[in-house]
Amino acid sequence: VQLQASGGGLVQPGGSLRLSCAVSGYTLSSVTIGWFCQAPGKEREGVSYIGRNAVRTFYASSMKGRFTISRDNAKNTVYLQMNSLKAEDTAVYYCAASRGNLIASSWYHERSFDYWGQGTLVTVSS
């Protein structure tokens, strides 16, 4: 499985970005997807997660209400819509795939995921 994250860039505070995670080498409907971010000098942390049928979604508390995760299985792509961006959202964002269905207590653990893509940098600054 290969994952390709894209869509990062420079945006002003309060702005929006949409990240994409393109999955290849595997049918997207067979895996679940998480987004993680790593800010400078900090550990990587879970941002959001989406289950196979998109019914199950989870968000980090600091992103809830501002970020929306979605998936298009026909396009083998998962999206992360990020609105009302703040300076503290500045980080490298990674997408990851899990062969399992994760639950509220497991989705934000890196060890729950089997495959990782390269990151895309999001910079929120005026």
Image (tube, rainbow, N blue to C red):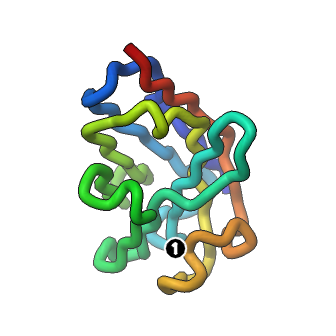
Q: Nearer the viewer, residue 26 or 103?
A: 103
Closer to the camera in the image, 93 or 14: 14
- Check disc 1 and report its element: helix, strand or loop: helix
Side of 92 relative to 49 (left or right): right
* Residue 99, percent from left and from top: 62, 76
Point out residue 27 in the picture as x, y percentages from the top left corner.
52, 63
Left or right: residue 118 compared with residue 100: right
Is 44 above or below relative to 6? below
- Looking at the image, residue 33 sits to the left or right of residue 18; the answer is right
Residue drawn at 50 percent across, 86 percent down: 103
Residue toward you, 121 or 101: 121
- Can residue 106 be seen in the rendering of this structure? yes
* Quadrant of the snapshot with the N terminus: bottom right
Question: Is 63 drawn above or below residue 107 in the view shown?
Answer: above
Tell me what residue is drawn at x 52 percent, y 73 percent: 30
* Relative to 52, residue 117 above or below: above
Q: Amino acid at mark 1?
A: Ser
When asked about the image quadrant of residue 98, the answer is bottom right
Residue 51 percent coordinates (x, y) = 42, 75
Q: Residue at x 49, y 45 (%)?
A: 21
Answer above or below: position of 2 versus 84.
Answer: below
Q: Quadrant of the C terminus?
A: top left
The residue beneath circle 1 is: 30
Residue 54 image point, x, y percent: 32, 72
Q: Quadrant of residue 60?
A: bottom left
Residue at 29 percent of width and 55 percent of height: 68
Q: Is residue 71 visible?
A: no
